[in-house]
Each structure stands twice: as structure tokens, then as C-alpha cells.
Image (spheres, grey):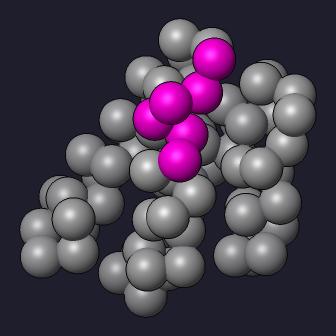
Amino acid sequence: LINTMQRDLKSSNHLEVCAALISVCRLVNNEMIPAILPTIIQLLSHAHESVRKKAIMALHKFWKLSPESI
């Protein structure tokens, strides 16, 4: 699951990245955060506004699950 999410988050298609970010917000748990966090942080500087917004939503979800991880 982590490899699939990482691949989708690194896609050149912004719709695919948005879909991956939505699934991250719903499926991630405390054990997955360290593996996905660096990719999410890179997406904060993405060209599309919707990707940046969803990346912030994912970081908020991570913070709610594990405040010390952010």
C-alpha cells in the first residue's frame, strides 16, 4: 500500500496526485507516516493549488494522529 501511494504521489498527473492525497487522508496510520511524510512535504510546492491544499490536509491528518511526527 505504501509503495502504491508513493508512486501515485510522485505522478506527473495532478488528478492522480490529488486522488492519492485523498486516500492518504483516509487510510494512513501511525506506522505509515514516516514513509509518506517526505513526499507530502515536497508536494507543498506543487504547481497546482489543489495539490498543495490536499497536501496541507494530509499534514493536518498526520498531526491529528501523531503530533510528534510533524
The residue nearer to you, when weighing 32 against 40, is: 40
Q: Where is residue 6? Give x, y as percent.
A: 73, 63
Left of 9 or right of it: where is 57?
left
* Residue projecting furthest to the left: 67
The quarter of the image holding the N terminus is bottom right
Q: Residue at x 87, y 34 (%)?
A: 12
Where is residue 46 drawn, in percent x and y? 59, 27
User: Tag count in the figure?
Assistant: 0
Residue appearing at x 85%, y 43% in the figure: 11
User: Which quadrant: the C terminus?
Assistant: bottom left
Residue at the image position 12 percent from the left and 68 percent from the top: 67
Q: Main secondary structure of the magenta part?
A: helix
Query: Does residue 45 appear left or right of residue 21 in this picture?
Result: left
Q: x, y percentage for residue 44? A: 46, 35
| In the depicted structure, whether residue 61 falls above or below residue 36 | above
Segment tinted magenta in the rendering: 42-47
In the picture, measured across the screen, residue 63 lies left or right of residue 20, that is left
For residue 37, what is the image quadrant? bottom left
Which residue reaches farthest top?
A: 49
Q: Is 44 contained in the magenta span? A: yes
Magenta span has 64? no
